[in-house]
Image (cartoon, rainbow, N blue to C red):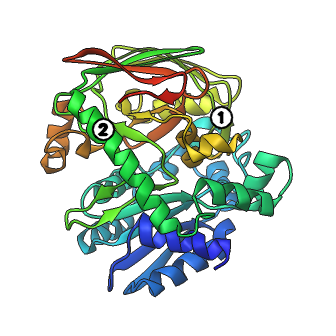
Amino acid sequence: MSLVERFADLVVRVGVNVQPGQGVVVRSDTAHLEIARAVVAAAYGAGAGWVEVDWDDGPIRRQAVDHQTLEQLTANRPWALERTEWWRKEGVAFIRLMGDADPHLLDGADPAKAAAIPVQESQAMRRALFDGVRWTAVGAPNPGWARQIFGEPDMDRLWEAVGTAMRLDAGDPVEAWRERSATLGERARRLDELELTEVRYVGEGTDLTVGLLPGTRWTGGGLVDPAGVPYMPNIPTEEVFTSPDKSRADGVIRLTKPLVLGGALVTGLRVTFAGGRITEVTADSGADVVRAQLDSDAGARSLGEVSLVDRDSRIARAGIVFHNTLFDENAGCHVAWGQSFPFAIDGGLALSEKQRAEAGLNMSSVHTDVVIGGDGITVTGRGPKGVVEIIREDEWVLD
């Protein structure tokens, strides 16, 4: 198999674990045409009953941002809501091929319009992903991405880096990911046993304490759908994560990796939290885009995820900045503002959205991961046994 074919096979067999006769939806930018075709072929090879590709296009998005009003950009389309609901009921497998072909595409655009999304459509998609739809999001190599990393569109070098991060260089990538998933799952089980009430991140420019909810459950390696079929929402994944108490986050963070948000590059981001809310944002570039997203709804300024990643990560070992959140978030510890994961607390999937909010989970139309880990990061947890070291100087030390 070529690297593209191994990539597609991994996405289909491990990412969403396509079952015979199942419908598959692939969302892709036009820049990923070759990879999308390979994913479609792999899905049919795994027995998919039908495959639909939902196309995006960066330059077309820029045209919309430049020429539509904010109200038009955020307007919800009834047909899109109906389609998402049908996908949910059918239990499709949903694959998202990600990777900005031009990270500077929205430079100079109105920040509010660049961050605009139809909120109800976004919420409907999130409900589907939390209610029976197996899904995966994966970074797809393209020349613009290669240029952002290496200064030139060196696709061979990018595929080599992506292949290493995604374990495509293993004799059997599928089995390699099953083994890694087991390791991460064991870390999650150990954290569950500690019954932590808070975690604290300390590093250069970062000192953040985040409260956890009663019955918090950590996740690592992958998930299992209601029918008992395993899948992996992100490839690569090197994290163990959960959702915190939305009202308990205090301190400051300094990003250790750039963030691409709404097509804009954000660098040098620093964020302050108080009482569970983001109260201040500064950055070397892109701060306006971040602020616009944080103002998009009531939950955008609170955390929906805390995550633990150590230097054993394949992405961390690569020693490069991928300029892609799916990869860079797995190079170090990270947090995310916005939507929580309902499966992060006991019985969360059975609760209504109102009940989840009342339980302390955050509700939002956005979910943005930001990396705060790397060299020097230390993470401790507090629980019935007092303070426990989890990561010391970027090394997993629990157990």
The reply, left or right, for residue 78 in relation to residue 105 is left
Image side of residue 397 versus residue 168, left or right: left
User: Which of the 4 image quarters holds residue 135?
Assistant: bottom left
Q: Residue at x 21, y 35 (%)?
A: 357
Quadrant into which the N terminus falls: bottom right
- Residue 261 appears in the picture as rendered: no
Give the residue at mark 1.
258
Please determine whether, in this image, residue 52 is positioned above or below residue 123.
below
Quarter of the view holding residue 300: top left
Residue 280: percent from left, percent from top: 51, 16
Residue 282 showing in the rendered view:
yes
SS of the residue at dot 1?
loop
* Left or right of 150, for residue 196: left
Kind of residue at badge 1: Pro
Which residue sits at x=36%, y=52%? 182
Q: Position of residue 144 (x, y in %)?
A: 76, 56
Could you say which is closer to the camera, residue 151 or residue 307?
307
Classify residue 125 as left or right of residue 280.
left
Q: Which residue is mark 2?
A: 363
